[in-house]
Image: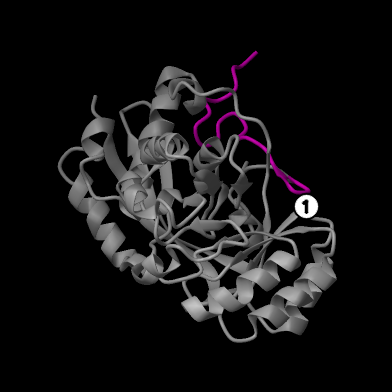
Amino acid sequence: MRPRLVQLGAARFPLETPFAIARGTRLAAELVTVTLHDGTHFGRGECQPFARFGESRDSVLAQINAIALAEMPGPDALQTFPPGAARNALDCALWDLRAKQAGKPVWQLAGLAPPEPVTTLLTISLDTPAAMHRAAIAAASRPVLKVKLGGAGDLDRLAAVHKGAPGAQLVVDANESWTLADYLALAPQFAELGVAMIEQPLPAAAQEALRGQPRPVPLCADESCIDRTSLPALAGLYDLINIKLDKCGGLTEALALRAAARVQGFGIMVGCMISTSRAIAPALLVAQGAEFADLDGPLWLRADRFNGLKYEGAQVHPAAPGFWGQPPAARG
């Protein structure tokens, strides 16, 4: 029996503290969830509409309905639909369903090595230097911190985080908020503070301005990198790409994008939206061997899904039996 969409809805997960970036502040994760059923097994997926790319909860719900209204397309046919949050939720639900049907984990079905725990960075939300200093002190035991920046005052913000967590490796994310002048002024100073990477300093539409400019700190494309079709335009501008399943449209494309990026010489960062473990479990498979993993989404929530991923210090562990992508444990 071909799988059919049996449940489609919205889920709201309140955050423990506000999460601020250059484009705004979130108080909750507003998610879209899907459930597929083949008559015996269920497959589940989750996505967060990406406002930066014109998505909303209603538009993503409408897209999913349009794709799966009559009959859910197979995995290959699904890839003909545009990348984005809707395709991600359906693609991951199909992978989860296949795992339950086969009694094998997704990593095995995809021809991957058994996943290992991954070290995830922790994000310091955009705020005043004083507030970010306090957040850094609280997170000083973490090996890697991601610092959200937003323009004026960014050097003070970064210096405050560095002072609060002097032993942590720092990654900064400007979320397209800088001008070229900002980049040329800040990058050398960030290098002196030991910053390991700058993520998306300029708006995607202005990224060509980076060509031929000094690069004292490695650069990572986030908003500029959607899927494999993005890669040619990124050559010579960035050293790494940030793979997010909600951008590229699911685990299938994420794995293909990772492989293509490696061939073309890019380093890999695997990121996430603020989400539950249901969205992080497939991303964890893509993050195996990545230079950076930004998989802290569930840590911002007041409560994660039941039987979600285990976070132990800076380590996030693969899914337990019965959770996304894993068949239930055999009964003794």
Q: What is the secondary structure assignment of the residue under circle 1?
A: loop
Q: Circle 1 is placed at which residue position?
A: 143
Residue 107, horizontal then vertical, whole percent: 50, 26
Residue 120 visible somewhere in the drawing: yes
Task: Assign the C terminus to one quadrant of the image.
Answer: top right
Q: Is the magenta stretch mostly helix, strand or loop?
A: loop
The residue furthest left is 70
Against 186, residue 237 (above or below) is: above
Describe residue 236's horizontal placement relative to residue 39 as left or right: right
Q: Residues within 10 Å of mark 1 (few under 14, many from 20)?
A: some
User: Residue at (49%, 20%) from the top-left corner?
Assistant: 104
Q: Is residue 6 magenta?
A: no
Task: Assign the N terminus to one quadrant of the image.
Answer: top left
Residue 202, horizontal then vertical, whole percent: 46, 71
Residue 4, horizontal then vertical, whole percent: 26, 37
In this view, the residue in front, 164 or 205, is 205
Describe residue 293's horizontal placement relative to residue 74 as left or right: right
User: Residue at (55%, 25%) from the top-left corner?
Assistant: 328
In this view, the residue in front, 12 or 83, is 83
User: Residue at (18%, 46%) from the top-left corner?
Assistant: 69
Which quarter of the picture shows residue 205? bottom left
Which quarter of the picture shows residue 164? bottom right
In this view, the residue in front, 153 or 219, is 219
Residue 18 visible somewhere in the drawing: no
Residue 319, horizontal then vertical, whole percent: 60, 35
Against 101, residue 247 (above or below) is: below
Report the span colored magenta: 312-332
Describe residue 19's horizontal placement relative to residue 96 as left or right: right
Q: What residue type is labelled 1?
A: Pro
User: Residue at (47%, 19%) from the top-left corner?
Assistant: 103
Against 290, residue 301 (above or below) is: below
